[in-house]
Amino acid sequence: MNSHEISYAQLLETNNLIQNCGDETYWLCVTRTVQGSKLFPVSPYILLSYLNSFYRYPSLLRKIEGQMRAEDIADRARNMGMKIQNSALGWALPNFYLLGRELLLSLGFLRPQDALEDVVCVMDFWKRYMLSWHRNDAHITNREYGHRAQILPDRRLEVFHSDMFQCEPGDALHEAACTFLATASQYGFLVSCESRISLTNSGPYRLDERHEMIVRDFMDLAECSLPWLDGVAQDVPYNYLTVPMAARDCHFSLVDDWGSFESRPEFTADHVVGVGLYTSDALSEGFVPVGMGSREELSGTFQSLNAVLKEATNKLWLRIADWTRDQMIDAGALVYYNIIKDLAHVAGVFEVDDWLTIDPRAQRFRPLLNDEFSNECLGALVGSLSLPNHCQSPYTMMQHSDRPTRTYTLLPYAVLAAEEYVPTSGPIQPGTSHLAPKIDRYRTSAGVLTLEEYNRQARANRPRLCSDKYRFLCETWVKYNHNTALANELYELEQRHSRTLGGKGAKFSPRSA
Amino acid sequence: MTQLYVDSDRYGEPPVNLLVETVRNAVTDLVRRKLTQSGGSWSEFVFAASDQLITTQDFEAIERQILSSGYRFAWSAVISARERPEIYREGGAMAANLASFSFEHPEAVVAVADDAGREQRGVGDNVVRRQENVSGVARYVRSSEQVIEYMNRGVPPNTIAIIDDSGGTLTAPILEHFTGIVCAGGTVRSHLGILAREYGIACLMGAKISGIRDGDRIELETSAEAKTAEAYQRGEEMPARIWKLAR
């Protein structure tokens, strides 16, 4: 059954990536969150999403790479705020897949060597994507960087910093911005069926001795590839919004691979002293300012967006309150599983059947997914690590716990000797959903499009910053070539929408002005 | 009996949880039977024959087998118990009369009334430290019907919501109108804690309380230190007190 040679080096590297994912997943799950919901059957949908991810991600990643390489998509991600950051790519892509694999291993459905080429494919895609997306800080994950995410290049940070409007607690902009941040966060939890995957934060970036900047992204806000937003989010004018936010006397000590942050002292709205607002997507030329013409315009824009999102929240909540359990589970499982769907949007290969249905191989497990089994099984899978496949030699001392356990089963090197394996779980199978069908309407920066048109325009779009001329003009190159015409061109391109830096190029530095 | 690859596990211990172990045993038995039935090798079975041979009906049979022992599942989402009350325990608990209902945590720290007439009825983890304590009227919020009622009639002023849902969705349409929140679950990093911080609402998470009824006036010690990540990691308590006030 072995289709082609997997090398020792590939297995060594894949197992290293798996182990790193396992160590961080344990830490994130044990220390970073305790969730419960009376509204959504969260654990049942999470388990179903893991199974769907296991059976489908390898095929879908191969399909995406048939159009666009992982590292090329990540170049785009570094220059905009779509849902291909954290937690989608930094954590969910490999870990949803690996958690599905581990669940099936625990139930006797797999051997460690089964789907071996799929495992190598998923981890290799993830590694190349993360190295490219994180190329400015040169780490694979935030974990590697001591839980920090310095994704953006100097030229973009200059624009965010320089164009940001200052605000103080009690003034109109501060009130409007902080209210918007709360409302958008709450809407995000609802859109994502009680998960945090519509929100992310990156940074921090040092502004001066007392100020740090966090970049906050809000994603899947409008009518998009989540069918439950059809109609209720029709008036939401942007699908992705990015808020660069300056905080005073507040050090962001941790930004993890889930996109959550922690700070000393505890972050509250009182620390916010500067904000901006941008949108971007697969069809835009990077970040485009929203309401950034003046303080008053920005304040009014935040107020207007706040009202629109509140209205959408109420409508969506009433829709969800009327759902059946199967609908709630499908929505939750799909929003989890399709957390990486924006890869397909950027590549222009998004298809509803790929991303908005449950594969029958996952679907059949549904009768097991009562609340109690799902809660206990999920706890065993990511917290207590108390399934047989987690148990290791008694000499083992796992990172963080010192117990003889391992989150993920490594690929066996014995496949390089005589051990037989099955390379792949095979192509995706036609799936189903209990939800209303997706209406063919997608809010983009180029207007409301059909999926066919969205895919066509995405395939045709290549932002100039990602063109061959500019994409490799990295931070090292800029450091030594900032006085060249080419560097000036690069900076002017980034500054084309900037209120304060437009046309100033690389020769001017707002930090020394 | 056909052996599965994972049956030969040098280090594996059975799952700690009995239900997980029961389900696992039933599913691995199912896989063994179907592998035997297929008559082929594991390689022919794992991603080919098993897709056809192991079906939804097989998993339904496992659920029936567990229920036939008299076992009933604990529920966590209201919809689960509402749709299939026959398979869940305590299916009617959400319908309890809120006027006489109270959370009763066995580890709630209580004390007699102090000089100011404040009777301690529990503790929680403070999300954000404030200059002052916060007081208001306790109101349990436990179902979507209550949320709809508050959406229609408005949240009464000075409401301190008592919630056992650490998520951010059940109370989404009304959350910003609360003066305070006491959540009987979760941590300061749960979604409800995150939203309370964003909205600037006083909030104690992971609360262990007793004897607080709907309509009681209560005070939250929001002037206490906010619980830190390090404290959670070390398993240290950083309690903020919750008092019932004299009427």
Image (cartoon, coloured by chain):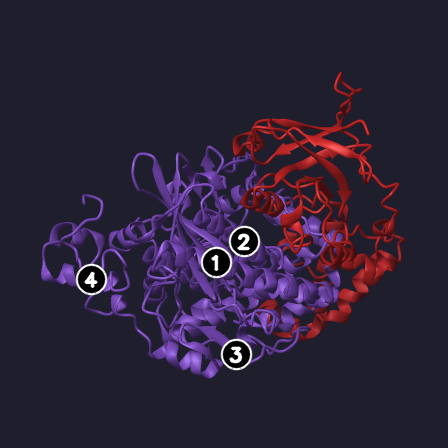
Rendered image: mark on residue A218: 1
Rendered image: mark on residue A185: 2
Name the residue that disc number 4 marks: A492
Give the amino acid at mark 4.
Answer: Glu
> What distance separates the C-alpha of mark 4 from that of mark 2?
33 Å
Name the residue that disc number 3 marks: A441
Secondary-structure class at tag 1: strand
Q: What is the drawing colour of chain A? A: purple
Q: Are marks 2 and 3 in contact (CB under 8 Å)?
A: no
How packed is label 2: few (under 14 Cα within 10 Å), some, or many (20 or more)? many
Mark 3 and mark 1 lie on one chain; the one further toward the N terminus is 1
> Residue A191: x percent and y percent?
59, 62
Hey, which quadrant is residue A73 in on the image? Answer: bottom left
Task: Report if residue A231 is visible in the image.
Answer: yes
Label 1 and label 4 in one chain: yes
Q: Is residue B156 left or right of residue B86?
A: left
Secondary-structure class at tag 2: helix
Mark 4 and mark 2 lie on one chain; the one further toward the N terminus is 2
Q: Are marks 1 and 4 in contact (CB under 8 Å)?
A: no
Task: Report if residue A387 is visible in the image.
Answer: no
> What distance separates the C-alpha of mark 2 from that of mark 3?
24 Å
Q: Are marks 1 and 2 in contact (CB under 8 Å)?
A: yes
Give the chain of mark 2.
Answer: A
Q: Quadrant of the C terminus of chain B?
A: top right
